[in-house]
Amino acid sequence: MTKTRGVALTRRMLAALLMVGTAGVAIAQTAADQDGPEQGAGAVDPTGLGLPANLQVFGNVDPNIRKATAIVNETVITRTDVDQRVALIAAANNVKLSDQERERLQLQVLRQLIDETLEIQQAKTADVTITKDQIDQSFARVSRNFGKTPEQFATFLRENGSSDRSIRRQIEGELAWNKYLSRRVEPFVNVGDEEVKAILDRLEAAKGTEEFHLNEIYLSATPDRQEQVFTNARQLIAEIGKGQAPFAYFARNFSEASTRGVGGDLGWVRTAQLPEALAQAATTMQVGQVAGPVATPGGFSILYLVDKRRVGSADPRDARLSLKQMTIKFPANTTQTQATARTSAFAEAIQKLQGCGSVAKVAATLNAEVVDNDAIRIRDLPPPLQTIMVSLQVGQATPPFGSPTEGVRTLVLCGRDEASGGQLPGAQQVQSQLEQQRVNLRAQQALRDLRRDAVIEYR
């Protein structure tokens, strides 16, 4: 299990960066934005703290004061640390932050840096040491995921107001915490054979049923605010549709559900597990589509369909394709008229293609670039292309897609290896997943304990 955790480290960190931060780094909605029903006299206190229903606050919190630095058990976190991490997140997501968003993100980043510091400190108590070579190797893997060498990635970070030091600190925290968990938590996690068998039995019973991987933004609405919240949800969907940031960005920023901390991710669910309105919406959605606002008890939901599958059945989108990509590019001074004319000529040439064998010849006449790839899964393509490729025959090409700034392209299908029959996971895979879930749960509990016992001074 330790090996699996280590291999997945860089992938998890990259995914976290592209979802605007890791482990709680999000652009959080302020308490003022979370309007809800007030506690009236005689209402039951849900916190269990015995708080009075009509309390009086002595003194005010100045909203203009932003605590940007902290000392965590004598380890200093500076304003530069915070600013560079914010810049890293913005650059990874290609998002331009407003002043208000930047302030909110700074506070959330500070919390993450505090957590990282606590994790590194706790790992040292177990004599965990992370070497420079280990950090360098992980940094190189992250660089490759951005399509850059370590030197190029370091330059990219500096140009965007961050530094390699910031991401190296994040890498050190991830490595140290995972190594600590492998020593102090994983050895004490056990999963019984009966538990594994029960899960396998449920999967067998569900074989053939459709599952949906959904992300959700939930907005609560009291009866007197239904219309306003509905309008806000429509505006939010319009912003999501612009494609300037991933759905998880908006879920972390606006959702009022407990899943906001994981970008609104509901995981894999079946319709029987969803409220009727959400189940109906999910069954009509295509992968990559946003739906809503969907009226649900107490408010409205916005859904994003990440993926869908049939339990234990082969999925056509798991087929592996052999493709040729043909791309035409436009000079910087190309006019709209010129771009339209060249794109039209490109589209006509695509229709006359006679299989993959003619791609090179046609590309030469169009001054187009050709790239081959023999191992692309359909589900790894953007959702609009997935729908096209599922029904495309060998030798056919997709309609042109792209833009004048990035180039107009087509994909020509040269071969297809169909997906093999779907198989249920084995007992070992189920056991590993259960163990990982329990390790993650204990890790969260351990981090909560560290936060509670830490000595933190804000500056």
Image (cartoon, grey):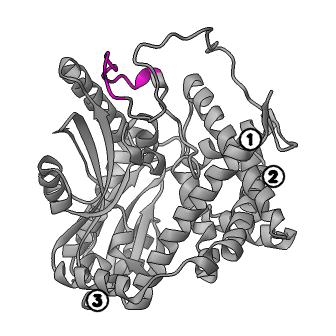
C-alpha span from label 2 to label 3: 44 Å
Q: Is residue 359 above or below residue 400?
A: below
Report the predominant secondary structure element of the magenta stretch: loop
Q: In the rendering, which numbered label is found on residue 165?
A: 2
Q: Residues within 10 Å of mark 3 (few under 14, many from 20)?
A: few
Camera-nearest label, 2 or 3? 3
* Residue in view at x 63 percent, y 64 percent: 147
Looking at numbered disc 2 in the image, what kind of residue is underneath it? Arg
Q: Are marks 1 and 2 in contact (CB under 8 Å)?
A: yes
User: Callout 1, which amino acid?
Assistant: Gln
Q: Which mark is residue 423?
A: 3
Q: Earlier in the sequence, mark 1 or mark 2?
A: 1
Of marks 1 and 3, which one's residue comes earlier in the chain?
1
**Which residue carries the number 1 mark?**
84
Q: Nearer the viewer, residue 404 or 445?
A: 445
The answer, for residue 314, to whether it is visible in the render is no
